[in-house]
Image (spheres, helix red, strand yellow):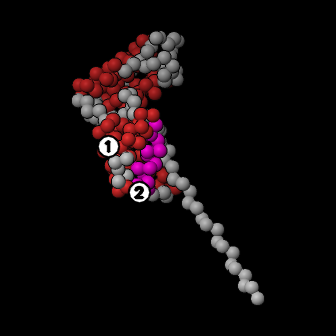
């Protein structure tokens, strides 16, 4: 008499982990420090909301999935020389800082802040974010960000109105510009 074989238990697959971070392309206007800082923030969010824990190796693969353009070409080039034990987030961080990190002193950061101006159609909040990216990880005074914001706004009327409010922080300056002059800080007319 043939014996019945017990049904096989279905193989339970784990949901694939994914880091919900922006892509990094390795362009001159991107801050590697700001991008790298988003990874632990995302890991903390996933731990708090989903209970997911990431290993350093998983973070390496999760983060490198968000490299695009020149950055992914660079990674492909160095991957050939990496042992599997070197494929950790800490090692990736060191190599990315060496390749894409800026070694600006305070004066150079001030110069970069002064050169950055609001682009036509760019929201004040996005403009402010780009300013904080320039100084990310460096000791930049709040007044420096506020001054760069006021000098870089592409609408002189908006800049004057925000300046008269005497904001102490970049966030205050942005909020005043949006509250008084619209989502794009346009007031009546955006200048080129």
Circle 1 or circle 2, nearest the eye: 1
| Circle 1 residues within 10 Å: few <14, some 14–19, many ≥20 | some
Left or right of 138 on screen, residue 159: right
Percent coordinates x, y for residue 32 in the rendering: 36, 37
The mark found on residue 133 in the picture is none
Relative to residue 15, is residue 96 depicted above or below?
Answer: above
Percent coordinates x, y for residue 182 in the rendering: 52, 21
At 73% from the left and 82% from the top, the residue drawn is 4
Say which of 80 and 111 sits in front: 80
Tell me if residue 88 can be seen: no
**Labelled pair 1, 2 in contact (Cβ < 8 Å):** no
Secondary structure under badge 1?
Answer: helix
**Marks 1 and 2, Cα distance to the nearest angstrom?**
18 Å
| Circle 2 residues within 10 Å: few <14, some 14–19, many ≥20 | few
Q: Point out the tag, 1 or 2, that comes first from the N-terminus.
A: 2
Say which of 147 and 107 sits in front: 107
At 31% from the left and 40% from the top, the residue drawn is 97
The mark found on residue 95 in the picture is 1
Say which of 150 and 33 sits in front: 33
Secondary structure under badge 2?
Answer: loop
Left or right of 12 on screen, residue 5: right
At 68% from the left and 78% from the top, the residue drawn is 6
Tag 2 residue: 55
- Is 56 inside the magenta-drawn segment? yes
Percent coordinates x, y for residue 158 in the rendering: 44, 16
Q: Quadrant of residue 30?
A: top left
Tell me if residue 20 can be seen: yes
**Which residue sits furthest bottom?**
1
Relative to residue 115, is residue 52 depicted above or below?
Answer: below
Q: Which residues are magenta?
A: 54-68
């Amino acid at each position: 008499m043939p014996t019945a074989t017990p049904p096989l238990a279905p193989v339970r697959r784990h949901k694939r982990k994914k880091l919900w971070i922006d892509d990094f392309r390795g362009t001159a206007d991107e801050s590697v420090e700001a991008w790298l800082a988003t990874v632990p923030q995302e890991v903390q969010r996933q731990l708090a909301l989903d209970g997911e824990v990431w290993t350093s190796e998983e973070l390496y693969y999760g983060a490198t999935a968000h490299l695009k353009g020149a950055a992914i070409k660079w990674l492909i080039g160095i991957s050939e020389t990496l042992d599997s034990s070197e494929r950790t987030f800490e090692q990736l961080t060191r190599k990315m800082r060496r390749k894409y990190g800026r070694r600006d002193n305070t004066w150079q950061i001030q110069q970069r802040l002064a050169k950055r101006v609001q682009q036509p159609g760019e929201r004040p909040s996005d403009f402010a974010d780009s300013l904080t990216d320039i100084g990310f990880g460096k000791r930049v005074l709040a007044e420096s960000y506020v001054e760069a914001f006021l000098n870089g706004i592409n609408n002189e009327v908006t800049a004057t109105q925000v300046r008269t409010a005497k904001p102490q922080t970049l966030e205050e300056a942005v909020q005043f510009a949006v509250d008084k002059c619209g989502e794009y800080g346009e007031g009546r007319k955006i200048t080129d």
